[in-house]
Image (cartoon, rainbow, N blue to C red):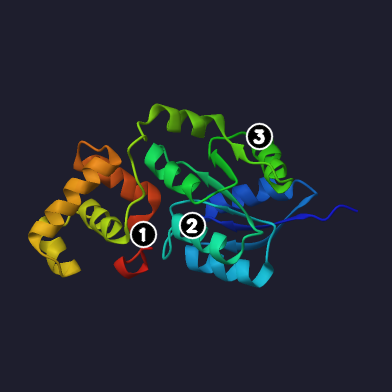
Amino acid sequence: MTDKISIVLAEEQALVRAGIKAVLENDANIEIVGEAVDGIECLELIRAYKPKMVLLDLSLPRLTGIGVISHIHKRYADTKVFVLSDANMGSVWQEAFELGINGSAMKSISVDGLLAAVHQVAAGDDYIDPAVQAIIDSADLENKKVLSIREKQVVKLVAEGYKTKAIAELLEISDRTVSKHRENLMTKMGATSTAELTNYANQSGLTKVELSEIE
């Protein structure tokens, strides 16, 4: 008898999480061993159940999906990571791929497509949804780099509407340093407006975590 594919599912929205669970558990070879609503709970469930795979959104409270992925690869190298997200920015997906995710799909993927992708990753092969690949291909990522913790903190605060002086006070740095961080961010991300920084913060989950929780 083939062992079931044990999965920890991490998705903040209850209705979406229930739908994904129903799709996966309709396959007799898949078992959802734990459900998490945030990144910290996800890591706790991974520690408790040692699942074959983690299927998670990137935009999670308390600890972002990117933060969860980083911890998984440091502590649970045998656990496969499958990202199911509606992020439409290439820079968000790039950061996930640079951390070594095994599977990626948009939430618009078909039921059969998701099940096939999960089995493919569980078998040891990587999977990239064509829709995700299209987002990456259409983005100019050649010169973009992963953001530092401080840069992520600045992006979060910019997205939340804080001005330079307020950001400087919250991070206990100078106004000039904040301005330099913003300049570097625009260059690193190839962004041309604050709206693009805000989109990144929302899609990567930075607006759902506290400053001290950013990794």
Secondary element type, mark 1: helix
How far apart marks 3 and 1 lie (CA) works out to 29 Å
- Mark 1: give few (<14), some (14-19) or many (20+) Cα within 10 Å: many
**Residue at 57% from the left image edge and 34% from the top image edge:** 129
Q: Look at the numbered discs 2 and 1 and tell me whether their residues touch, using CB distance below 8 Å.
A: yes
Report how far apart the C-alphas of labels 2 and 1 lie in the structure.
10 Å
Where disc 2 sits, the SS reads: loop
**Residue 89 visible to the viewer:** no
Q: How many marks?
A: 3
Mark 2, other Cα within 10 Å: few <14 / some 14–19 / many ≥20 = some
Q: Which amino acid, by three-letter code, is at mark 1?
A: Lys
Residue at image position (45%, 60%) is 67
Q: Is residue 170 left or right of residue 65?
A: left
**Residue that label 3 marks:** 113
Q: Earlier in the sequence, mark 3 or mark 1?
A: 3
Image disc number at residue 70: none
Secondary-structure class at tag 3? helix
Front residue (pair 110, 8): 8
Give the label on residue 12, or none.
2
Q: Using a 10 Å C-alpha cutoff, classify the residue at mark 3 as few (fewer than 14 neighbours), some (14 to 19) or many (20 or more).
A: few
**Residue 94: percent from the left, percent from the top?**
43, 42
- For badge 3, the amino acid type reads Gly
N-terminal of the pair, mark 2 or mark 1, is 2
Instruction: Name the spot of residue 114 as percent of width and height, x first.
Output: 64, 39
Residue contact between numbered discs 3 and 2, judged by CB atoms under 8 Å: no
Q: Is residue 133 above or below residue 195?
A: above
Question: How far apart are labels 3 and 2 at the CA level?
Answer: 22 Å
The residue beneath circle 1 is 208
Give the image quarter of residue 168.
bottom left
Q: Position of residue 181 (x, y in %)?
A: 19, 53
Q: Earlier in the sequence, mark 3 or mark 2?
A: 2
Mark 3 vs 1: CB contact within 8 A: no
